[in-house]
Amino acid sequence: MDRLLLIAHKKNMLNKRYKELVEEAYNFRQTDSALSDISEYRAIKLLDKINKLKYLSRDTAKPA
């Protein structure tokens, strides 16, 4: 597979997990704030990885 396709696939998987963690953090907010904070922290760490992958897969062509 092409490098950009691998990056896109990994980014999609991380986005899916990120959304799950954000939803989990929201659901725990009223019942268990500690679990909510843990899920939110994990989501933030995933978002950092997603942003790094976005940087790697950016279009290198210069606009005209």
Image (cartoon, grey):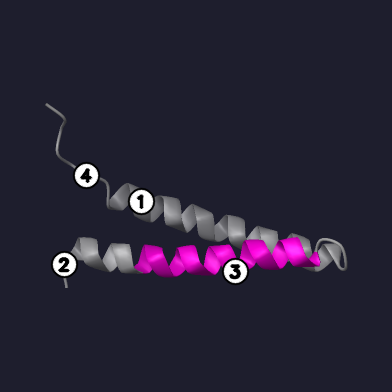
- Amino acid beneath label 1: Lys
Report which residue position mark 4 lands on: 59
Report which residue position mark 3 lands on: 20
Q: Which of the marked residues, 4 or 2, is nearer the chain's N terminus?
A: 2
The x and y percentages for residue 23 are 66, 64
Question: How far is disc 1 from disc 2 in space, using C-alphas?
Answer: 16 Å
- Amino acid beneath label 2: Asp
Q: Which of the marked residues, 2 or 3, is nearer the chain's N terminus?
A: 2
Q: Which mark is residue 64?
A: none
Q: Residues within 10 Å of mark 1 (few under 14, many from 20)?
A: some
Q: Residue furthest bottom?
A: 1
Q: Which residue sits at x=86%, y=62%?
A: 30
Report which residue position mark 1 lands on: 54
| SS type, badge 4 | loop
Question: How far is disc 4 from disc 3 in space, using C-alphas?
Answer: 28 Å
Q: Which of the marked residues, 4 or 3, is nearer the chain's N terminus?
A: 3
Report which residue position mark 2 lands on: 2
Q: Is residue 22 magenta?
A: yes
- The reply to whether dot 1 and dot 4 touch (C-beta < 8 Å) is no
| Dominant SS in magenta | helix
- Amino acid beneath label 3: Glu
The x and y percentages for residue 22 are 64, 61
Question: How far is disc 4 from disc 2 in space, using C-alphas?
Answer: 15 Å
Q: Residues within 10 Å of mark 3 (few under 14, many from 20)?
A: some
Q: Residues within 10 Å of mark 4 (few under 14, many from 20)?
A: few
- Amino acid beneath label 4: Asp
For residue 8, what is the image quadrant? Answer: bottom left
Vertical relation: 55 (above or below) 20: above
